[in-house]
Image (cartoon, coloured by chain):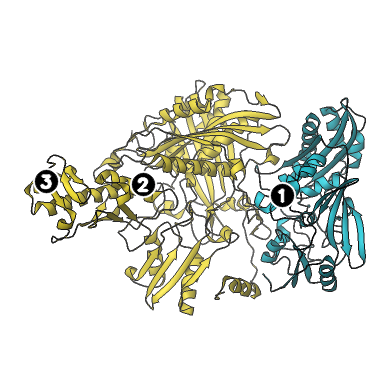
Amino acid sequence: MNQFQYVRATKPQAAIDVVAKDPTAKFIAGGTNLVDLMKRGVMTPQKLVDINRLPLNKIEAQPTGLRIGALALNSAVAGDAQVRARQPLLALALNAGASPQLRNMATVGGNMLQRVRCSYFYDLSMPCNKRQPGTGCAALEGINRMHALFGASDKCIAVHPSDMSVALVALDATVLISGPKGDRQLAFSDLHRLPGDTPERDSNLEAGELITAVDIPDNPFTRHVHYQKVRERASYAFALVSAAVALDIENNTIKAARLALGGVAHKPWRLPAAEQALVGQPATEASFRRAAEVAMQGAKAFKHNAYKLRLAPNTLVQALKTASAA
Amino acid sequence: MVADTYERARHAARLVQAQYAKEAHQTSMKAGAAQAFLPTSAQKNPKSPMADYQRGQADAYKSASLKIEQEYVIPNEMHSPMEMQSVTAHWEAPDRLTLYDKTQGTLGTRRDFAREWSLPEENVQVIATFVGGAFGNALHSWPHESAAVMGAKVVGRPLKLMLTREQMFTMVGYRPYTWQKIGMSATADGKITAISHDSIGQTSTYEEFTESTLAQTRMMYQSPNLTTRYRIAALDVSTPIWMRGPGEATGAFALESAMDEMAYLLKLDPLEFRLRNYTDQDPEKNRPWSTKFLKECYQLGADRIGWQNRKLEPGAVREGDWLLGYGMGVGTFGAHRGSAHVSAQLLPNGHVVLQCATTDIGPGTGTAMTQIAADTLGIDPGRITFELGNSGFPQSGSQGGSSTVNTVGQAVQDACLALKDKLRELAGASQPAFASAKKEDVQLADGYLTLASAGASRAQYADLLKQPGAAFVNVESKPTGTDGQTYSMYSFSVHFAQVAVHVLTGEVRVRKLVSCADAGTIINQKTAANQMKGGAVGGIGMALMEDAVIDHRYGRYVTKDFADYHVPVHADAPAVEVAFVNQPDYHVNALGTKGIGEIATIGVAPAIANAVFNATGKRVRELPITPDKLV
């Protein structure tokens, strides 16, 4: 691990000021990803600004939705009565992630800013444009069975690893941000980026910007929801593919749908066309299968991840079957 | 890098810029197998178990009409014990070294480092009182141990070195990638007529690692024609090492999968197919088994798993979105017994202290030995201390090859009998009843010695211990007689699995696992069952998830932490049901034990693979069976 300074912030603005002024500084909350990356030497911040003491861990009911503080723990959100009643999809996705020990440390803000889990990103001896721009993407022609189907570039084909984020993008969440230039809001779907020519940038946050909360608007998706996560063991593994689905069904007809896939792109992958394909359709496996076909349009596989071309639509269909039967 | 704290050492190590001269390399078995060769040991000795084997006609299956011919692959699998390799080296004097080491053999490690430093063996002490799981990876001395010894010499202080999990992937050996091919033919009524089994295992360019991948094939089933050919391929990789079940587990994946494939070709129940080819004597060596209760294991297991519910037709049982299937796999491993020394001493307070250099890497060796001693001496286990894991104690081989209870257990029994006899002799000096008694007749009571046949005679321990000649014995125990040449000695196991496979996602869940063993006398039901369960869970890892993937362009592992290299978690492990036949085999030793460690894993992976086929109709011949192979 590199030598670094550690400071503890007690006010959001103070934390922001430090990180905005110092490009080598990083916020740290649960540290479940950053500390690993520092141990490996993948990230080498010169200064850590501990934000755990900031008053940002509340889960509050607002007139039009829920506001979840960025420092709320994953386990606290997943177990919160309001979250379970009003946004059960989020609770399901959170509980599918990591292990209980990690969920007890990891925060909502940190979860969405997890870095990719591509093995080449983690191995300092390998080329990786995300870690070291311009060195090339070792995964492109390498071992890429975990990698992207959508929105990849020849600079980076890694996928975003968060489960929670797949639910949040499906639920039309909004991220609240404080920064050196003041406060702003960002649609959750705009928080993460596709790699393009700048894979070193995971998100659209500017230097020194701090996520303070996430807003989830009320919706009718309190019953027919499911988070289906396919992984290589029964628990404690990153998704090969995951699907977050939320349906509003009346008289067996789908009135509204929200769909997203995880493990297929550099960002949680919302599926607007597939959602449209479901509206007005009967909640049957045939409808789900057609929507899954729409969802997969434009998918492009690499040498080792062609199985995801079958697994992703199947996972979506299974999630829809389970959600509609709930 | 040596430093006074772990953090400083790691930081300093990161600052070192290493430069390497690039050379062409080969890490891929797919490419390297073309240069596979017969191991040197077999080239020198045609009777080596690694040599080609032939009975009847070579490759006779080829001309048969009912035959299968398939290839099977297992990838590199990494040793993943809880405790990483760790050593503390301390030069007590310029020519005296003490190692606190993770090792399965204190004497093997002592020998290696005495040689490396040209020291007399008695100048090296190796202590391994506790070992946090080893599974074979501590049966060899590794480079990091040498580094620690050298470092301690340079700094003149005790030096500790513990590998990181990532370093475990390249520093301590692994189950090698192995390619296998099986050809098998049978008659329409289910009698095997020929088996050919070829295997190529991975080794390094600087050491030849070999293992008994083909042993089970040669002796498990009656087949008049049988051919085995074992080869290794040397790659630019670190040297493999035994990993629980070792080669036999690798070989059983191919053999027991092939048995299942043949049963399907014949439209026979796979259990019935195995019964029709059951061997009542060893077909390899043409001599009787010392004991074999495999049929009894089949029955125990079939009853417990509910084998009668299995449908022959694959894909026939569906429960919601899951397909259900049953499978079985058989395992065997030699019932090895070596020689061991054990000492036993009676203390004035009536406690007995036993010592042996053997290690306990997790199976509960200390418990089993204490139990054997308690049974032999007839005293409460609380009065017995069994001390192990120290090269200064009486000699024993390494803990490996399922042989510790067979070997050390017998030595414990012998030492306890010798101690009784010694005490009888000491008591006999003053009490004639003891002098003429048999050692079996001697009883150790609370503070004094008695005779079963003459309850009135007593000898106080305090008095005995005052006499000349201590109440101490050091006994060597080793196989005697001709049983080893007359009989073939093996432990046997069968594993039955019920799995569920998701029709859309290809996820496999092991719903139920039943493991039954003919391992001779079971010394301790709990620790023995614990070994069987652990071995079964290891088999789940082998079948469904363990895969150390190398990017051959760079010759580096890309799955080298527990995020990428998956071992089973609790959610992957069903309640494993264990049953023992528990029949003694007195040809192995007087305790009747045969060994458990390896047969707990051998045959589990094919049981699961066969169950996946029964569930889905998909035959996966390259492990692990991950969702991508089924979806």
> Label 1, on which residue?
A75
The amino acid on which the numbered mark 3 sits, given as a three-letter code, is Ser
* Eye-nearest disc, 2 or 3: 3
Q: Are marks 1 and 2 in contact (CB under 8 Å)?
A: no
Is B572 positioned to the left or the right of A49 in the image? left
Give me the chain letter of mark 1. Answer: A
- Please say if B209 is above or below A49: above
> Label 3, on which residue?
B457
Is B480 positioned to the left or the right of B492 in the image? left
**Element type where label 2 sits in the image:** helix
Q: CA distance from mark 1 to mark 2?
A: 43 Å
Q: Are marks 2 and 3 in contact (CB under 8 Å)?
A: no
Residue B429 picture location, percent across and down: 8, 54
Q: Residues within 10 Å of mark 1 (few under 14, many from 20)?
A: many
Quarter of the image for residue B491 reads top left
Q: Earlier in the sequence, mark 2 or mark 3?
A: 2
How many numbered tags mark residues here?
3
Where does the N terminus of chain A fall, quadrant-wise? bottom right
Give me the chain letter of mark 2. Answer: B
Q: Which chain is cyan?
A: A
Quarter of the image for residue A171 reads top right
In the rendering, what colour is chain B?
yellow
The amino acid on which the numbered mark 2 sits, given as a three-letter code, is Ala
In the drawing, what numbered circle is on residue B368?
2
Is B528 positioned to the left or the right of B514 in the image? left
